[in-house]
Image (spheres, rainbow, N blue to C red):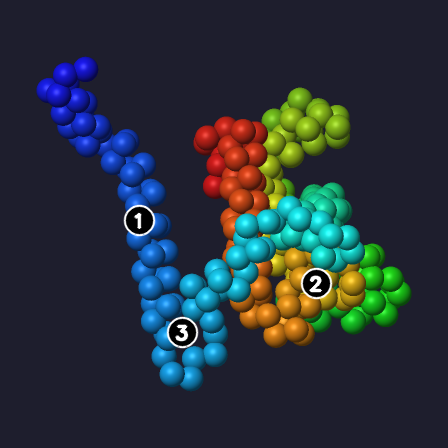
């Protein structure tokens, strides 16, 4: 390739709107992160600052960053295994919340009397923060693992339930009229009209719920002493005064939460037609 051809290709890349948009998608967040790190470093360098700077965090947690897969037995494991164990608990609690939330959401969406009866209860319970459920879960279930799963479940169920109910109520009346004219059986009505029409709202609830379930893992794992999990890892680091390890753990939690959200968006894109995506 000649120099002239190389310059021509370079110019064509810069003139391509898609290339410039992709480059901006990378550069803009990178610049924002760099600015944030610089500000953090400056504030951490001020007299009296108690939080470690980014450089100090890296120095203190270098072994954890370098070896996320190490396993010395017990709770002495790398952050990969800590996150992996937490994800397993989230998967169980979230799956249960999805099944129960969608089922009850469809029920109250179809029956206004049941909806009116249960709505005050739901509105009260959904505002209770995850940490507040910890003592009642322990008192009721008496075991750490079920209590932790319950905290995840009770945190994730509300957006799924409420969005499903809204989706069922928003089914166009024309669809219901057609179903009545054709005298569709209940099974066919559910799978051909109700569920497809409510699916965009269900996915909205599922997407919100996966974030809440991941947020609840800290509260859930605080109740489980001596186990592997990112929540207990943070609690243990706090008790031992390892602030840099807490900050690194929060970074892991944020990245995993972001990836979970992207995964839900990908699944939604694969299942829903473009006209139904919210």
Residue 232 numbered mark, or none: 2
Of the residues tagged 1 and 2, which is closer to the observer?
2
User: Which residue: 83% across, 67% down?
Assistant: 138
Q: Quadrant of residue 218?
A: bottom right
User: Which residue: 48% across, 74% down?
Assistant: 51
Q: Secondary structure at mark 2?
A: helix
Asked whether residue 115 is in view, the answer is no
Q: Nearer the viewer, residue 96 or 252?
A: 252
Residue 184 in the image: above or below residue 87 = above
Q: Is residue 187 left or right of residue 265?
A: right
Using the numbered discs, state the Cα–Cα distance from disc 1 to disc 2 in whole angstroms. Answer: 34 Å
Q: Earlier in the sequence, mark 3 or mark 1?
A: 1
Using the numbered discs, state the Cα–Cα distance from disc 2 to disc 3 in whole angstroms. Answer: 26 Å
Q: Nearer the viewer, residue 263 or 80?
A: 80
Of the residues tagged 3 and 1, which is closer to the observer?
3
Q: Residues within 10 Å of mark 2 (few under 14, many from 20)?
A: many
């Amino acid at each position: 390739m000649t120099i002239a051809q190389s310059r021509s290709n370079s110019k064509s890349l810069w003139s391509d709107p898609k290339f410039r948009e992709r480059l901006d998608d990378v550069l803009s967040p990178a610049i924002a992160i760099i600015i944030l790190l610089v500000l953090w470093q400056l504030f951490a360098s001020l007299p009296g600052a108690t939080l470690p700077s980014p450089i100090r965090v890296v120095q203190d947690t270098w072994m954890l960053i370098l070896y996320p897969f190490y396993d010395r037995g017990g709770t002495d494991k790398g952050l990969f295994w800590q996150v992996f164990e937490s994800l397993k608990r989230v998967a169980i609690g979230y799956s249960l919340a999805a099944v129960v939330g969608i089922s009850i959401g469809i029920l109250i969406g179809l029956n206004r009397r049941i909806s009116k009866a249960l709505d005050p209860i739901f509105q009260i319970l959904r505002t209770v923060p995850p940490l507040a459920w910890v003592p009642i879960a322990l008192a009721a279930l008496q075991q750490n693992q079920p209590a932790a799963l319950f905290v995840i479940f009770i945190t994730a169920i509300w957006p799924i339930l409420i969005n499903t109910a809204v989706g069922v109520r928003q089914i166009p009346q024309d669809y219901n009229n057609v179903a009545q004219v054709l005298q569709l059986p209940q099974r066919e009505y559910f799978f051909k009209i109700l569920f497809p029409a409510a699916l965009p709202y269900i996915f909205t609830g599922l997407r919100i719920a996966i974030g809440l379930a991941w947020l609840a893992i800290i509260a859930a794992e605080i109740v489980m002493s001596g186990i592997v999990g990112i929540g207990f890892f943070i609690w243990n680091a706090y008790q031992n005064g390892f602030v840099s390890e807490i900050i690194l753990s929060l970074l892991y939690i944020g990245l995993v939460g972001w990836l979970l959200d992207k995964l839900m968006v990908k699944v939604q894109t694969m299942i829903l037609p473009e006209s139904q995506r919210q």
